[in-house]
Amino acid sequence: MKMISFCNKKGGVGKTTLCKNIAYKFALENKKILLIDLDPQANLTMDFAQENIKFKNSLMDIITTKNNIENIEITKIIKVSKYKNIDLISAQKELTKSSLIIGTMYEKQEIYSISDMLYQYNQETFDSYDYVLIDYPPTINELSLNFLILSDLVIIPINDALRAFKGILDLKDNINKICKQENRKTPNMKIVFNNVKESFNFVTIEKWIQDENLENLVIKSKIKYSDAFKTIENELSSIWTNPYYWRQKQAYEELIAEIM
């Protein structure tokens, strides 16, 4: 099992779009996928959930049972999605309360070991998947950091919005700080240019990346902006089945080849 997180401390950079398109491609190749939606907005959940899905179950159901966490099987909150080979742990609005719940119920030394406990007590279930892909909100809280430091790879999307670059630096600093605090290895991090135009902002961001010595984190493949693709990106399978979007398809295939 490989756990991949899609995160940036800036909204609107395409975290969910990257996550869902990569998940669907993996599924087409008969890989077994578990999606975890940590964003209370639940956009990933809405894209993959079956019509009769109930939004009553999320990771909050397990987190709030601290003293019994080892006895609760994560399969109870995993749902079958409407796409073959893809399962889902859905989001719900109560995720906004996760920081309060964790801060109240857990000791300081336990806060960043919640995801470890979840994995250890449900290792057989997690390891039955080829990939676990996680979508995050732009606001990074304790629950988010739990899964970020557990991940094998953190993909950080960035577009040509200048403020998105600060999101990279802030996220990187947060992850490094918690990993140092918890005495654990820092996950591999990769920056992906997503939905970008050749512009002054793009050139500026490339220079900032050089100035911060982050070039080694940048994935070579860049997903270019397309007006036509933007209008249909909610149609999940279109990037892989519609011949008019071959540029986006090629960019995604190159991206996937780099992260596998």
Image (cartoon, helix red, strand yellow):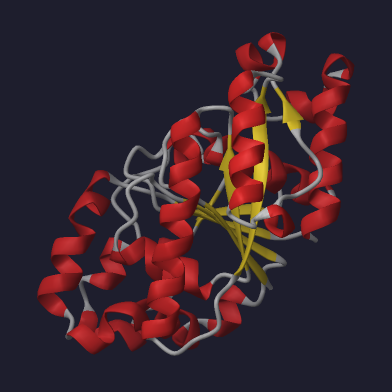
Q: Residue at the spot x=65%, y=34% of the render?
A: 194
Q: Residue at the spot x=43%, y=83% of the render?
A: 180
Q: Is residue 114 above or below residue 89?
A: below
Quadrant of the image for the N terminus? Answer: bottom right
Q: Left of 4 or right of it: where is 50?
A: left
Q: Position of residue 29 (x, y in %)?
A: 85, 51
Q: Left of 50 or right of it: where is 26?
A: right
Q: Is residue 6 above or below residue 195?
A: below
Q: Residue at the spot x=85%, y=42% of the render?
A: 253
Q: Residue at the spot x=77%, y=44% of the render?
A: 25
How many discs appear? Answer: 0
Q: Position of residue 57 (x, y in %)?
A: 33, 56
Residue 30 makes an appearance in the image: no
Residue placed farthest to the left in the image?
104
Q: As rendered, which of 203 and 72 lies closer to the eye?
A: 203
Q: Position of residue 238 (x, y in %)?
A: 75, 23
Residue 65 makes an appearance in the image: yes
Q: Left of 94 or right of it: where is 16?
A: right
Quadrant of the image for the C terminus? Answer: bottom right
Q: As rendered, which of 19 and 194 lies closer to the eye?
A: 194
Q: Position of residue 226 (x, y in %)?
A: 71, 15
Q: As rendered, which of 165 and 64 lies closer to the eye?
A: 165
Q: Left of 49 or right of it: where is 41?
A: left
